[in-house]
Image (cartoon, rainbow, N blue to C red):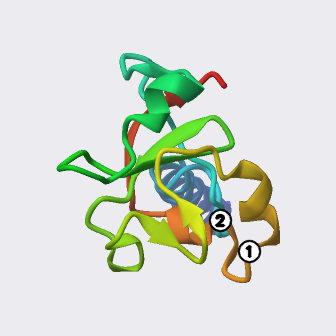
Amino acid sequence: MKKFVIMFLCAGLLFSILSSTACSSGGSSASTTSTTVNSSLPVFTAAQLSTYDGKNGNPAYVAVDGVVYDVTDVPQWSKAVHNGHVAGTDLSSVMKDSPHGSAVLNGLTVVGTFSG
């Protein structure tokens, strides 16, 4: 009986540790590209987003799946163009077909949401 109680307590402790680790890492150990967006960030319309084209000293932003990312300092966007796609636009449809997929968005700064 004593061994059972000790094993039960150890299992509970292990479950508790694993649960808190999963929660702090987004609830899953699988690689995802979902982005949590702070609700206090600005909402961009297509017209507003277009001003962030990376030209004339403007930052370079792109929208993907309703989230606006800052690509200003991303080397592949150094001239505000990447593989024929320009900053200041919604790239949701082209991202689905891109060879790298949306994983490249991980780690980029989220600057707002996109309303279209």
Residue 38 in picture, x, y percent from top left: 42, 27
In this picture, residue 51 sits left or right of residue 23: left
Q: Which circle marks residue 102 in the picture? A: 2
Are the residues at dot 1 and dot 2 in contact (C-beta closer than 8 Å)?
yes
Residue topped by disc 1: 98
- Up-down: is 83 above or below 4? below
Q: Residue furthest left?
A: 57
User: Which residue is at the far front?
Assistant: 56
Secondary structure of the residue carrying numbered label 1: loop
Rendered view: 39 above or below 113: above
Q: Residue 9: where, in percent of width, then height?
A: 55, 55
Q: Position of residue 15 (x, y in %)?
A: 59, 56
Mark 1 or 2: in front is 1
Marking on residue 81:
none
> Could you tell me which residue is drawn at 27 percent across and 48 percent down?
59
Task: Identify the residue shown where x is 37% and y is 23%.
Answer: 41
Image quarter where the N terminus lies is: bottom right
Query: With respect to residue 14, does 50 lie above or below?
Result: above
Q: Mark 1 to mark 2: distance in Å?
A: 8 Å
Residue 87 locus on image (x, y percent): 47, 54
Number of residue marks: 2
Q: Secondary structure at mark 2?
A: helix
Between residues 6 and 61, which one lies in front from this camera angle? 61
Label 2: how many residues lie within 10 Å, few (<14), some (14-19) or many (20+)?
some
Label 1: few (<14), some or many (≥20) within 10 Å?
few
In depth, the one of 104 and 46 nearer the eye is 46
Q: Amino acid at mark 1?
A: Ser
Above-or-below relation of 86 to 64: below
Amino acid on which disc 2 is placed = Ser
Residue shown at 56% from the left, 39% from the top:
67
Q: Nearer the viewer, residue 8 or 99?
A: 99
Q: Residue 18 appears in which quarter of the rendering?
A: bottom right
